[in-house]
Image (cartoon, rainbow, N blue to C red):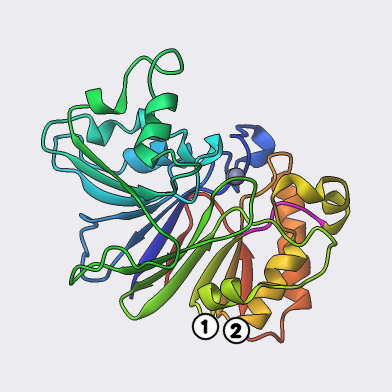
Amino acid sequence: MARLEFFGVRGSHPTPSAQNLEFGGNTSCVVLYSDADPDGRFPLILDLGTGLTRFAETQPHDGSFSGTALLSHLHFDHIQGLPFFAPVDKKGARLEIHGPSEDGKSLQDSLDVLIGSPFFPVMLSELRGEIIICDIESSKMILEQPGRPKVVPHLVDHTNATYGYRIEIDDKVVVFIPDHQAPLDGSSFVKNSVLELCQGADILIHDAQYTQDEFGKKSHWGHSTYEYSLAIARLAEVKSLAFFHHDPRRSDAQLEAIEQQYQQQNADSQFHVFAAREGDLVRI
Ligand SMILES: [Zn+2]
Ligand SMILES: [Zn+2]
């Protein structure tokens, strides 16, 4: 039985406030562990948002850290934790990062622009651990080595090059699509490639930033609604759906009400739906 922990569930930007304490204010970061790794020594990190700094608190700072990260895309809310990830700033530590290139610019080139002067005082290459940065191609399996999870990335619609990931771990399937543009016309049409990515997943962690009303005003901002993520879950016959990438203005009270509403509406569905909370540990 694999396990999964939410360290950041918010979209767009961090939102520390008294009204957000239950669901949390940190941005996108989820960590997966295989059952074959009961001590959690080889984490698979999904996105490097500010939630990564919370994850860092659980990790060794003595140079023994070793982990792999899958980056959905390069927007701030998905990478802002990386320059503050202290476990990799020790000799002997190792972090492998897989993610998209765009417009002929490698992932390494893009990260070097953002993490370096004048945006940040230190470059990634100056951290004392080993950081390996790999461009990936859509639909081409990565991490194929024995004993590691199987990962298939697939480009999904958003505003920049963005991957969704299908991860097979301990005979379970986890699908991570934190940012996903729903059809501009508000319909529930789902591309075959997205259905393939999500088909039969044990858990789908999906962009659910907007209500239908909000989507009417921000349809081209690159995100999904609660209804659209539910449509994908139904069509792809997933077992569990986690609303993710919560709008930064959504309070705990609003998220609780939304979660309750959709749990009641889908009480007879084949899947369980919930709103991801920072600190939630899910056994798959
Ligand atoms: Zn985002
Ligand atoms: Zn984005």
- Return the residue nearer the eye: 110 or 224: 110
Highlighted magenta segment, given as a residue range: 207-211
Taking the view exactly as shown, the residue that stands out farthest to the left is 92
Please identify the quadrant where the N terminus is shown.
bottom left
Residue 147 at x, y percent in the picture: 19, 71
Tell me the residue at 36%/60% (across/down): 32
- Return the residue nearer the eye: 271 or 234: 234
Amino acid found under the numbered disc labelled 2: Glu
Q: Main secondary structure of the magenta part?
A: loop
Q: Is residue 95 magenta?
A: no
Dot 1 alpha-carbon crowd within 10 angstroms: few under 14, some 14 to 19, many 20 or more: many
Q: Are marks 2 and 1 in contact (CB under 8 Å)?
A: yes
| Depicted 187 relative to depicted 73: above or below | below
Please identify the quadrant where the C terminus is shown.
bottom left
Residue 132 at x, y percent in the picture: 24, 42
On residue 200, which mark appears? 1
Q: Which residue is mark 2?
A: 237
Q: Is mark 2 within 8 Å of ligand 1?
A: no
